[in-house]
Amino acid sequence: MIALTGLTKRYGGVTALAGIDARIEGKIIGLLGPNGAGKSTLLKCLLGLIPYEGDARVLGLDARTDGAAIRDRVGYMPEQESLLVGASAVELCTFAGELSGLPRVEAMQRAHAALYYAGLEDKRYQPVEAYSTGQKQRVKLAQALVHDPELLFLDEPTNGLDPRSREEMLALVSELPVRRGCAIVLSTHLLPDVERVCDHAVIMTDGRVRFVGTIDELRGARGNEELAVEVKADAQKLADALTKGGARCEVTSPTALHVAGVTTTQVFAAARDAGVQVRGLAERRESVEAAFLRVVADINGGPPPVAA
Amino acid sequence: MSVIHDLGYQRYTGPRRAAGTRWRVIARQQVASAWQTWWRFKAALGLAVIVMCSACAILLLAGDRKSSLGRAQSFVITLQDTVLPESIIWFCRAGFVLTLTTAATVVASDRQSGAFPFYFARSVRPRDYVLGKLAGTALLAAAIVAIGPLVVSLVRLGLTESADELRGQLPIVGKAVLLGVLTTLAYTAVPLGFSALLGNRRHAVALWAAYYLIAGQSLYVLGREVWAPLAAFDLPRAIQAIAYSLFDLGFRAGRDVEIPLGVAVGALVAHIVVAFAVLAIQIRRAHTRGVGAA
């Protein structure tokens, strides 16, 4: 979907993107990184808006030479307010569709459909300026969808939303690949959003891509997935048995322990040998937030844990 | 979470219009949005219609009356022959109202509302944006400052009493068209250039109004008192000077400055060229900054 080879962008003496090599695939991809990491510059390069060195291909098209064709097939929901003065939601979305090359009648029909999808069916004739923050976010999503893009760039789609609106926006986003068959690149600072909807992640810092892979790979990148084990009694006894087998254990209560470095089968075998009754066993996964912080922290302390 | 509606969504597989046609979409939207509210375009159009009807009424009622113009030079000219060049300053006033409500806010509004990502994240090039906004604004301006003079010239033709007189008067239609085109260009490009200078639409309108009314009038006074060509930098006076020259009224009684045709055209062209340059540079900048700018 997105292929980058030696992608470099310099603003004078400042290197915004430092020779990025990556292949980005997935249905919903979280683009993560602190401010100044190069996310916005990367988006501009991918949309073919600014010159760069190296190679960037989006949907099989060269961003340097086919920028207009890419933008016809890509939807962009900006972070900042991006509306037209005096326009209603229908007018705005119809105009957006026409600007992306749709015939007028088709653009109008799809504008209504996109606004229905975004949950603005009863507000679509009102001027957008009068909308609440949540409604404006929905209009921005609808205008990004109206021309039927194959790939959507969403820049902080839940910014400024209350918890309920945020949940609704994330539900809309997570349904898009299923209902409309488009892939999504979600640029956000809100890591719980990524955890909630993304299947892949790209982590950037200092103009470099530090991680590309699935969310599971990100969580498991350090290779020590943990199991949360609940026993009837004698958690320490099971911990001792597992430790002898090479596992790392942390007893959290007389009836619970966390285990790393073993499989579930090995846990059950050790419990049987130790005479301990297992009452519950669950995979204890690292949160995306913790994984992100670990990746960013690892950059300063050691080689980046790039999974793909 | 409410139910998600998809209205029987199907992927669009039809053709897309060529990227080179996007400016037309922008121009049409520009006209449509100006038409929506009475005060943006319709108020100026109403003024232009009043001017046009007044000019036509004077033409019809003037008969063989002589104009006071040229009296100082003992030059005799009929009132009918002076109505069109005299009315142009009034069409310019209607045009100025349009620039205040529409043209001088165009780019500043888009910048203020963050609309540049809306345009440039699509296959809209800076030149499509500039061309679209120019074409849309020019259509609106033409309705105010070009159609009226054309109608007045046609009414003047209709008042001729013989084929010979008709042939003699025929060039005024061409002159009215030329004047309309020049005035349309001036009342399109210059306020658009001002609208591109600032990121707040009210400030842009204020700056344009100050330039048009205060700077223009000051230059006109300086031209009258110090050096005549300076007066040509007052836009309506430059257009009026061109009108007088086109209609062979290159003189004026009273204290007004006589601006030579070349100087008036030069000043007008300078305004338009500078405005185009400002517009092109500002939109080019917005194109690279507008999308994904954190």
Image: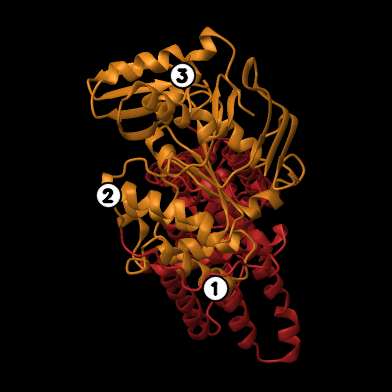
Chain colours: A orange, B red
Q: Is residue B238 above or below residue A206?
A: below
Question: Residue pushed farthest bottom?
Answer: B162
The quarter of the displayed image where residue A235 is located: top left
Residue A249 or B52: which is nearer the viewer? A249
Horizontal and vertical percent for residue A286?
A: 41, 27
Please give the chain letter of the residue carrying mark 3: A
Kindly report the distance in space between the C-alpha atoms of the residues bearing marks 3 and 2: 30 Å
Q: Is residue A84 left or right of residue B269?
A: left
Q: Amino acid at mark 2?
A: Arg
Kindly report the distance in space between the C-alpha atoms of the residues bearing marks 1 and 2: 56 Å
Kindly report the distance in space between the C-alpha atoms of the residues bearing marks 3 and 1: 71 Å
Label 3 neighbour load within 10 Å: few <14, some 14-19, many 20+? some
Which residue lies under the disc numbered 3?
Answer: A294
Label 1 neighbour load within 10 Å: few <14, some 14-19, many 20+? many
Image quadrant occupied by the N terminus of chain A: top right
Secondary structure type for disc 2: helix
Q: Name the residue rendered at 27%, 49% in the picture.
A: A164
Which residue lies under the disc numbered 2?
Answer: A164
Residue A138 or B228: which is nearer the viewer? A138
Horizontal and vertical percent for residue A236?
A: 29, 16
Secondary structure type for disc 3: helix
Which residue lies under the disc numbered 1?
Answer: B148
